[in-house]
Image (cartoon, rainbow, N blue to C red):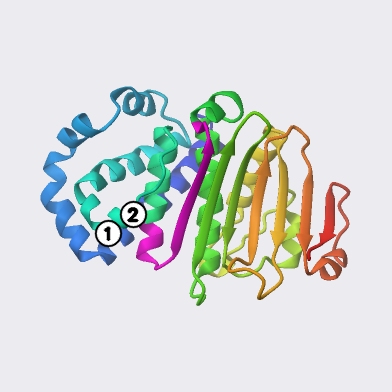
């Protein structure tokens, strides 16, 4: 494993473990439950998991996939606690790494009193085979959802929505949240220099750079839509269209403000309704 990839893996691994422990510690009932049930984890994996799926995650472990092995473990253990969250059942993509990630993020959202919704359209397994690898898609989703949850912070409106679509005409990923608006300079810096959305909490901007690298690798079009205050429960939406066009489009009610710092040639700014 190359040094840069190893350091990225180590950073992501530490963050995941730290936040998993914080999530468990904040829920004393879950802590007690896991303590009692941990000896049966191996048995639960064998009885509830897809053996091929679980094995493939272990065999193909890498700088990103390793993160989701732990998330997959949390998913399998979650089957023992499913009676607690039946009303929050999520649709299934059929891609085990993605399903584990969504379950993990839902648990975090519940712990933070965030209304988390997931919408799946089409064959997502086919999407990971033909359009973007499951590993890269998981990494992309993890970065976007992490940023969205941090942006929501202590806001009164606490909503986060994921839409994943794959059909004959399009493959798209959309993340909508009710968090704080982006700093205007971020639009100009996105993918060029590190610009964190959560500097106060120790953010480094690596997540945004990773998002841009995946966008560039797959020549996906990035659309960022900012909603006029009072017109939606969400403040913004980040959408990636895997269309091989490699566009970068901003649609915002703050167009004039953004244009004041707009210098890059690959960014288009439109006025939102």
Disc 1 to disc 2, C-alpha distance: 6 Å
Q: Is residue 3 visible?
A: no
Please tell me which residue lies in front, 197 or 167: 167
- The residue positioned 46% from the left and 47% from the top of the image is 12
Report which quarter residue 180 is drawn in: bottom right
Mark 1 highlights which residue? 24
Q: Position of residue 122 (x, y in %)?
A: 54, 34
Is residue 178 found left or right of 56 in the rendered image? right
Q: Residue at x 33, y 54 (%)?
A: 20
What residue do we see at 65% from left, 53% from top? 238
Q: Answer whether residue 184 is magenta in the image.
A: no
**Residue picked out by circle 2:** 20
Q: Position of residue 94 (x, y in %)?
A: 42, 32
Pinpoint residue 242: horizontal percent, then vertical percent.
68, 36
Instruction: Kindly state the secondary structure of the residue where label 2 is placed.
Output: helix
- For the record, the magenta segment spans 107-124
Mark 1 surroundings: few (<14), some (14-19) or many (≥20) residues within 10 A: some
| In the rendered image, the vertical position of residue 253 relative to residue 219, given as above or below | below
Question: Would you say 54 lies left or right of 237 here?
Answer: left
Q: Position of residue 260 (x, y in %)?
A: 87, 67
* Location of residue 229 (image quadrant): bottom right
């Amino acid at each position: 494993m190359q040094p840069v990839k190893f350091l990225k893996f180590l950073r992501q691994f530490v963050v995941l473990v730290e936040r998993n422990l914080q999530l468990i510690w904040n829920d004393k009932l879950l802590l007690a439950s896991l303590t009692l049930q941990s000896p049966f984890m191996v048995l639960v994996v064998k009885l509830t998991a897809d053996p091929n799926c679980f094995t493939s995650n272990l065999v193909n472990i890498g700088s990103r996939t390793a993160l989701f092995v732990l998330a997959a473990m949390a998913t399998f253990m979650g089957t023992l606690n499913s009676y607690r969250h039946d009303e929050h059942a999520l649709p299934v993509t059929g891609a085990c790494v993605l399903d584990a990630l969504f379950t993990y993020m839902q648990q975090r959202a519940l712990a933070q009193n965030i209304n988390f919704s997931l919408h799946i359209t089409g064959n997502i397994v086919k999407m990971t085979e033909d359009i973007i690898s499951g590993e890269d898609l998981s990494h992309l989703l993890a970065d976007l959802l992490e940023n969205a949850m941090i942006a929501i912070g202590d806001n009164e409106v606490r909503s986060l929505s994921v839409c994943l679509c794959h059909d004959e005409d399009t493959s798209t990923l959309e993340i909508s949240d009710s968090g704080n608006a982006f700093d205007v300079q971020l639009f100009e810096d996105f993918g060029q220099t590190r610009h964190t959305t959560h500097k106060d909490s120790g953010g480094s901007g690596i997540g945004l750079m990773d998002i841009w690298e995946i966008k560039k690798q797959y020549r996906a079009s990035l659309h960022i839509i900012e909603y006029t205050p009072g017109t939606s429960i969400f403040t913004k939406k980040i959408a990636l269209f895997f269309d091989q066009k490699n566009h970068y489009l901003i649609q915002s009610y703050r167009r004039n403000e953004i244009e004041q710092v707009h210098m890059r040639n690959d960014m288009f700014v439109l006025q939102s309704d």
